[in-house]
Image (spheres, grey):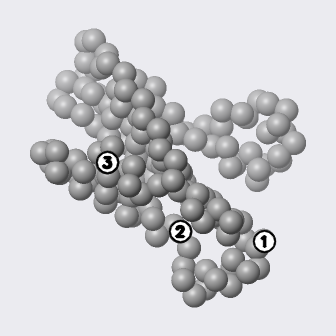
Amino acid sequence: MKDGLESTGTKFTVSIDPPPAPLPEHPGHFAVGNPMRNSNFAAMMGPQGAEAFKMATCDGASFVATLSNDSMNRFGENTKFVACVFPYINGYSISVWHKFMMDNNNIGASLARNVVGDSSQFIPRTVEALVSGLKSAGFVPTVVESF
């Protein structure tokens, strides 16, 4: 899983914690929020700027991978991923959250997008890389939902 994600982005981090004991009956799930929502900085950014700070958190996950693909940052595009692995009695559950942000105020970039598309095309490729990495490790993953 790590190799599949790491190969599709420009910034990659992993954190690994031991599973809880005893294992929960049901898997966990990520939560989306703005960790800066009550800060003065978020207030200065206004509603649209504060939206850029939303991130997924994975409380209770044993493995958390975060990935950013800012290769198209100069064109006002950025993609973020968070993958959370939650152990539970019947196995593991993986929750994947992704966010694509685009600045529409860059006229040159907007014209280029009409010809070549935007970097949101990396989202399905990254999810597929994650699934392929799990298959190559001997798992039989099923994507239930992707946000």
Question: Which residue is tagged 3?
Answer: 3
Name which of mark 2 and mark 3 comes first in the sequence. 3
Which secondary structure, mark 1? loop
Task: Identify residue type, mark 1.
Answer: Asn
Question: Which residue is tagged 1?
Answer: 105
Question: Which quarter of the rendering shows the N terminus?
Answer: top left
Which secondary structure, mark 3? helix
Mark 2 or 3, closer to the camera: 3
Residue projecting furthest to the bottom: 115
24 or 14: nearer the viewer: 14
Whether 28 is drawn above or below 49: the answer is above
Q: Quadrant of residue 35?
A: top right
Question: Which residue is tagged 2?
Answer: 119
Q: How crowded is mark 2: few (under 14 residues within 10 Å), some or many (20 or more)?
A: many
Q: How crowded is mark 1: few (under 14 residues within 10 Å), some or many (20 or more)?
A: few
In this picture, residue 39 sits left or right of residue 130: right
Q: Quadrant of residue 37?
A: top right
Q: Which residue lies at the image location 41% right of the left edge and 57% below the top edge? A: 8
